[in-house]
Amino acid sequence: MAILTKGPRGTQDIMPGDTGRWQYVEQVTRETAGLFGFREIRFPTFEHTELFNRSVGDTTDVVQKEMYTFKDKGDRSITLRPEGTAGVMRSAVEHGLLTEALPVKLSYLISCFRYEKPQAGRLREFHQFGCEMLGADSPAADAEIIAMVNEIFQRLELKEISLEINSIGCPTCRAKYHEALRAHFSARRDELCDTCRERLEKNPMRLLDCKSPICKEIAKGAPTVLDFLCEDCSSHFEELKNRLTSMGISYTVNPTIVRGLDYYTKTVFEFVSGNIGAQGTVCGGGRYDGLIEQLGGPKMTGIGFAMGLERLLLVMEHSGSPFPEETPCKLYLGSMGEAAAIKAAALVAGLRSEGFRAENDLMGRSVKAQMKYADKLSAQYSAIIGDNELSSGLVKVKNMVTGEQHEVKLSLDEDDDDSLLNFLYHTGFAELTDAIEDAGL
Ligand code: ATP
Ligand code: MG
């Protein structure tokens, strides 16, 4: 019955040894987004299928091949979200967020679902952190969004990642570009893969994205979108570049970036790493000026991005970015005998209220086995209470690294310098002073 002991293909369990890394990344992304004025929004894991057909676009891989779509018991077509933007837009329109002061800045941290072929950096359930800025048309907004991703990566000390930008124009200039692409690809129509032949009419830009070697080869000589931009799109792109330069953010212009989803206009960008295999795009984003209207909302522009957290963690691990240490167990308070065990539990509860991670015996182990367990926990200090300690009110606390012992009062009295509580506080200070000295501050 492997089905009961092995998760579905393309899913990943995040184990206790790894959740600390996830929490850290989530905290940094949320905090940075907060500094840029983005407020978190939460929305359902599933939506009406039509929402994704309309927004992501029915000529995209996501809609054509990758969606988890099913009929619910009320015979409605439901889809597990393959991305976040559609849900955020639906929710913002439904709740009148777009009538608030502009720009509206929203962030989200979600799981997404796509039926894809699992491989490194490509899962069927994965996680995205994303942001959307609505109602700001100017390149300043594009620059701010990109600067924010850049700031997140700097805070995470992410190396080996580069920014690539492009403009894919607006519906007006893109029409001419589509014509040019159709002319280019039609000349070798018979050699194209089946999917590309189908897309040639409806969405020729997608052919630039095809992974088949022959389509890639044909795409090499294709006209570039930047030669077709109208005045407005072109000056928008120029100003974005100037702003990035003035903020000290380096980038390269890559005219082959078209992005997988249908709703993008003007600016598109990706942060790419060459070190995590074929799936190197950690973050993708762009402007989607027609999307809100297309979903039945007001005429309002938008720009956003989504970063894949699994890929982000892969790059961080590969490039040796630092992760915070797990909070260590400060004290293992062992015991000998029933009365001492009860006392130990009460003291440990008190220490936890004071913010210390502390543990006591829950297994009825021998003292020797308790000490072995304290070692396994990598507890910084340990102490054992028995009848003697109960009657004297004193206990020896052992530094588990140096073996040094200190006798303290078996009490959590904060006014008593010799109490166990104050001992632990002071060792905290001592460690802090050592750390400050080590850092040369
Ligand atoms: P790809 O080029 O890998 O197919 P995409 O263009 O489909 O990516 P987007 O829809 O732009 O990706 O999603 C934004 C980010 O979400 C990606 O850059 C990536 O980091 C992450 N992502 C997308 N699909 C997956 C997946 N199946 N597994 C893990 N992460 C993913
Ligand atoms: Mg994809």
Image (cartoon, rainbow, N blue to C red):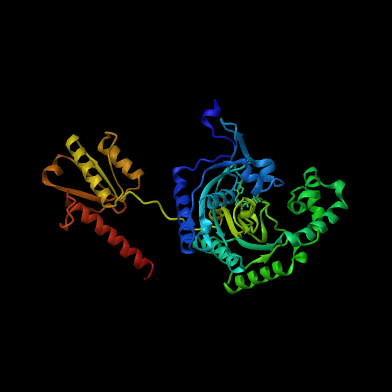
Residue at 70% in and 68% down: 232
Q: Position of residue 434 (x, y in %)?
A: 32, 64
How far across and down, in percent of the image, does residue 106 sit?
A: 51, 57
Residue 116 seen in the figure: no
Q: Residue at x 66, y 47 (%)?
A: 54
- Is 300 or 115 nearer to us in this picture? 300
Q: Position of residue 190 (x, y in %)?
A: 87, 46
The outermost residue toward the left is: 391
Q: Eyeballing the image, is 191 above or below 240?
A: above
Farthest residue to the top: give it.
Answer: 1
Figure disc tally: 0
User: In this rendering, would 259 be left or right of 43?
Assistant: right
**In the image, is 50 to the left or to the right of 231?**
left
x, y percentage for residue 265?
A: 67, 59
68 in relation to 315, above or below? above
Q: In terms of depth relative to the viewer, which is nearer, 410 or 309?
A: 309
* Towards the viewer: 170 or 66: 170
Tell whether 223 sits left or right of 132: right
Residue found 53% across the figure and 53% down from its top: 92
Q: Is residue 82 visible?
A: yes
Residue 134 lies, with reference to residue 54, above or below; the image says: below
Q: In which quadrant will I find the C terminus?
A: bottom left
The quarter in which the N terminus is drawn is top right
